[in-house]
Image (cartoon, rainbow, N blue to C red):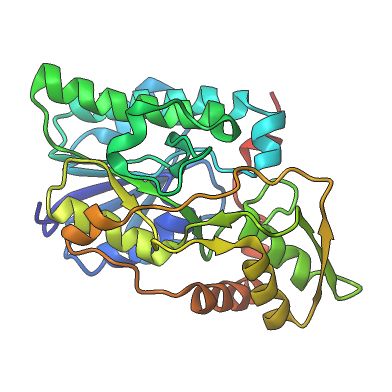
Amino acid sequence: MNLSGKNILVPGGSGMIGRELINLLLTKNCKSITVVSMDDNVDLPEGVKYVKSDLRYFQNCIDICEGIDVVFSLIGIKGSPKMMLEQPADFLVPGLQFNTNMMEAAMRANVGWYLYTSSVGVYETAGVEVLREDDVWKTFVSKNDWHGGWAKRMGELQADAYAVQYKRNNISIVRPGNVYGRYDNFDSENAMVIPSLINKAVNSDDKTFSVWGDGRAQRDFIHACDVARGMIYVVENEVTEPINLGSGEAVSIKSIAEIIAKETGTEISWDISKPVGDSKRLFDMTKAKSYGFECEISIQEGIKDVISWYIENKSLSKNRYNSFKEKK
């Protein structure tokens, strides 16, 4: 799929991955780029249109898909293991609404290509050494991602249903690992591990920051810039099978905390009373590499970049729409 001259829609594009994706799309000579989210005061590059819209409602999805050639769907709910345990409905219900409505609206609008952003949460990780794309439907979802993971799986199943019934083989599916980057949610109460620890370390009054668990848990981290590159890569190459987007390297939370402590001049305080999620999540990157995709940003380089960005742009992170704090 050649993106030159195409009308591009990026639902959920005002966040961490979306910002990096937009920067890359601006180099592709697209006819138009439209971003849709629930954020206020969104400062996007010149030439990018912004629409504030709640995509839980089907008519809103129908409206924004009119005249669109390619959809990069980034909409979803992202939060810490604690939030997944305490507020599961906030992951499951809007996740199902977003996925179902956007994909159906795009198909009705006869969109030329659709990228669906799935998640590492679709995998069962207990007792699994490496997460391979073809193993997803052989197991259930991990209990630590039970509600959000099933919502993402249903999106993948919806794409498969269109392919079978309507012969619509124009959907790419990517499964990003533990993504971090600029414009992330840095709220220490509900953010993922890297932005949460950066927030704690940078804003610490006593030069110490607390880390949940003992640090032994391992994750496959990937910078948002690399995720954006992978998304464009699979669309341009019209890849229609699910693809993992990760580094293929298992990095411990202890290593992450130590990098952040070194870069911020702080000390680590371990809180072993708190939940830590699955012990290990590591992607098999064989399939992605067979298509020619590999990460370019190391974990050390990436964290250093995000810390510098956060220190200079703290106010921006406070303007993000937070579904966990939305009044019901």
Q: Going by the image, does 214 lie left or right of 91?
A: right
Is residue 52 shown above or below 219?
Answer: above
Is residue 314 shown above or below 1?
Answer: below
Counting from the top left corner in percent of width and height, residue 306 is at: 57, 72
Q: Residue at x 18, y 22 (%)?
A: 162
Q: Residue at x 33, y 27 (%)?
A: 137
Counting from the top left corner in percent of width and height, residue 323 is at: 62, 36
Q: Going by the image, does 48 lie left or right of 233?
A: right
Q: Is residue 56 at least partly visible in the picture?
A: no
User: Toward the viewer: 319 or 159?
Assistant: 159
User: Toward the viewer: 145 or 249?
Assistant: 249
**Viewport quadrant of the C terminus:** top right
Q: Going by the image, does 53 lie left or right of 237?
A: right
- The picture quadrant where one finds residue 23 is bottom left
Counting from the top left corner in percent of width and height, residue 79 is at: 61, 43
Q: Residue at x 86, y 76 (%)?
A: 207
- The picture quadrant where one finds residue 168 is top left
Is residue 190 shown above or below 158?
Answer: below
The image shows a total of numbered marks equal to 0
Q: Residue at x 60, y 48 (%)?
A: 279
- The picture quadrant where one finds residue 326 is top right
Counting from the top left corner in percent of width and height, residue 8 is at: 24, 49
Q: Going by the image, does 255 lie left or right of 110?
A: right
Query: From this viewpoint, which residue is outermost toward the top?
Result: 165
Q: Is residue 196 at least partly visible in the picture?
A: yes
User: Toward the viewer: 129 or 252?
Assistant: 129
